[in-house]
């Protein structure tokens, strides 16, 4: 199927690539069919492109690409709604907001997108975790993640730390 988009021009997508949000997204409930477009530059950012309206697209990112950990409880009702039976079939994305200064870009950790990779059903879920912000600063979280990864690596390799000191 060919769709016309504002950002990417005319693109060809396969029916198997379409992700179906039965309830739409918060604020965009009228739109149900989306496709994820990957950047070719190896960037962790993706585009969630609406199939029904080529002008509508969201920048998305997997939380673990910029955070050390992102623990979210997926309710039984969300699992049942998506017919999600195995944790490994769940894919989580967060919607990114990019202001005039890209350094201040944020991710909505409170309203992640949950996708069942098997049946391509999706839902925007709500996190009840008080540590999940609607505007988590991505670059700040990346710095925390890098520091935490270094601490973990250092703890796994104490000999290297002694040699450096």
Image (cartoon, helix red, strand yellow):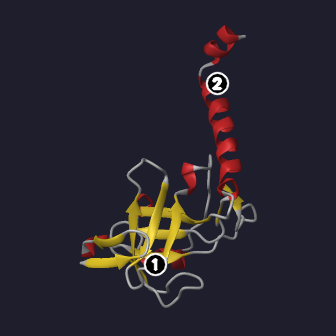
Residue 70, image quadrant = bottom right
- Nearer to me, 11 or 76: 11
Element class at badge 1: helix
> Going from the N terminus, do you reach mark 2 or mark 1 first?
1
Residue at the image position 40 percent from the left and 67 percent from the top: 36
For label 2, the crowd category at 10 Å Cα-Cα, with few meaning under 14, some 14 to 19 and many 20 or more, is: some
Indicate the quadrant containing the N terminus: top left, top right, bottom left or bottom right. Answer: bottom left
Residue at the image position 70 percent from the left and 43 percent from the top: 144
Residues at marks 2 and 1, CA–CA distance in whole angstroms: 41 Å
> Which numbered disc covers residue 125?
none
Above-or-below relation of 113 to 157: below
Above-or-below relation of 38 to 158: below
> Which numbered disc covers residue 80?
1
Element class at badge 2: helix
Q: Position of residue 116 (x, y in %)?
A: 40, 69
Check disc 2 and report the residue beneath it.
154
Q: Position of residue 27 (x, y in %)?
A: 59, 85
Q: Position of residue 49 (x, y in %)?
A: 43, 73
Q: Nearer the viewer, mark 2 or mark 1?
A: 2
Residue at the image position 50 percent from the left and 77 percent from the top: 123
Residue 34, image quadrant = bottom left
């Amino acid at each position: 199927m060919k769709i016309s988009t504002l950002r990417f021009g005319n693109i060809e997508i396969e029916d198997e690539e379409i992700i179906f949000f039965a309830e739409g997204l918060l604020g965009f409930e009228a739109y149900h069919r989306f496709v994820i477009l990957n950047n070719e530059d190896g960037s962790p950012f993706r585009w969630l492109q609406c199939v029904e309206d080529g002008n509508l697209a969201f920048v998305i990112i997997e939380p673990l690409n910029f955070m050390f950990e992102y623990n979210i409880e997926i309710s039984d009702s969300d699992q049942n709604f998506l017919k999600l039976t195995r944790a490994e079939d769940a894919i989580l994305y967060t919607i990114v907001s990019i202001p005039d200064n890209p350094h201040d870009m944020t991710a909505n950790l409170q309203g992640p997108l949950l996708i069942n990779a098997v049946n391509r059903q999706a839902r925007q879920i709500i996190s009840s975790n008080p540590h999940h912000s609607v505007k988590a600063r991505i670059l700040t979280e990346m710095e925390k993640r890098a520091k935490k990864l270094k601490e973990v690596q250092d703890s796994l390799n104490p000999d290297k730390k002694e040699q450096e000191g």
